[in-house]
Image: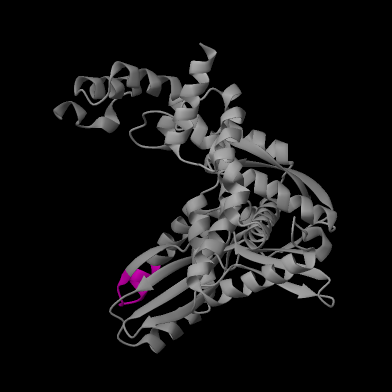
Amino acid sequence: MTNLSKFYQKTWMQRLQALMDQQLISVEQRQLLEKSATDPAVGDQQIENYLTHYGLPEGLAFHYLIDQRRYLVPMVTEEPSVIAASSHGAAIVEKSGGFYTKVTDHLLWGQIVFEQVANAEKLKSLLEQQQEKLLQIANQAHPSLQQRGGGARYLRVRFLASDLVSLDLAIDTQQAMGANMVNSMLEAVADYLREQVSTPVLLSVLSNLADQALATAVCRIPVELLARPQITGQQVAQKMAAASRLAQLDPYRAATHNKGIMNGVDAVAIAMGNDWRAIESAAHAFAVKKGNYRGLSQWQLKNDESVLEGTLTLPLPVGFVGGSTKIVPLVQLNHHLAAIKSVGELEKVMVSVGLAQNLAALQALVSEGIQQGHMRLQLRATVLAAGAQPAEVATIVTKMQQLQRTDLATAQNLLAKEHEGEH
């Protein structure tokens, strides 16, 4: 495949032609790549070896009342049930008075790790004695951050092993996620320490465990609002509290419990131009901080079991400026739709979405079952995959429900019969 050498140096059209020359794509496939490439110039700036834009659908979640303010929440996801569940959970909380939130300072950790440490206590003492100098060097490496009210705040020293020591800097990144800022500041400090300390530096890099950038959402729901067909609100609330306890005890359940939370959080993160992988990393590391992997949210009965209280705390290393927020036009539109004006406000919305998503999932799980709640939306996707036109979907979905069949072959057979009947 010699024609693919130095692929990154080719123009977009040259890349497509190179794939054609090597018979890796057909004419029709090239046309699909070209049609999907909504903005090749932007794509080339975002990733290496750009081919096309891979689209994900965006929708709006409703009913979010957060700290007595109403929000429309843009969400980007390929999962059919996520936005429906998000709006459903938010609607229940809205009737209960809404979400109440709090956020901490937006501090990220950066690590400078020393290896081959001969005397850990001596190294710790030396580093702590130079705290003011080290913070000064860090801030000089990114003076504009300090001018905006941010910058390096403090440091700590941790012993990781007898020969490994981590110097951690807490850095206030203000409205930005700040990975590049943090890494630049760390490199400046590491360069200085290489001259001051004989112990070698293994690495200096941002940590995604953002446990000093926390957002918490709380909601209190009268149990009668949780009622479902064939089961009372009291019973639903009791079962939800029990399922929450299970997620604190069993990592197998906790993993799925937390995945449901992140369904919503990730969808908002993508819509807002944020690094959802960093958020996932932070959340799952935070879930295991006490030694065992646990559910990130908790639901408990209060007030003589008349109220179900839900609480979710998440580390949210997110940004309101920088990165894709300025490059992708839809991000600016989504900021406008949500009427979000700061990183703290974005954190409040994201943690509330996570709690609403969890509420809807648990309510369905302990009442009619999660599969029934998802079924119609999943069937729509199956019918579309079978080749149905949008106007045909509802008819085929209804017939599949009557047959109690959910597979692609059934959808294709029903669609073929529908077309035969038309002729």
Tell me residue 215's x, y (percent). 66, 62
409 w.r.t. 201: above or below: above
Chain part drawn in magenta: 192-201
Report the side of 410 relative to 316 (left or right): left
123 w.r.t. 153: above or below: below
Q: Nearer the viewer, residue 311 or 47?
A: 311
Report the side of 126 relative to 402 (left or right): left
Residue 132 visible in rendering = yes
Tell me residue 314's x, y (percent). 61, 63
Query: Residue at the left extreme?
Result: 2
Report the side of 19 relative to 262 (left or right): left
In magenta segment, residue 348 = no
Q: Nearer the viewer, residue 189 or 309?
A: 309
In magenta segment, residue 200 = yes
Quadrant occupied by the N terminus: top left
Report the side of 95 relative to 137 (left or right): right
Q: Nearer the viewer, residue 335 or 359?
A: 359
Q: Residue at x 35, y 37 (%)?
A: 48
The coloring applied to the image is: one colour
Q: Residue at x 65, y 73 (%)?
A: 242
Residue 317 visible in rendering = no
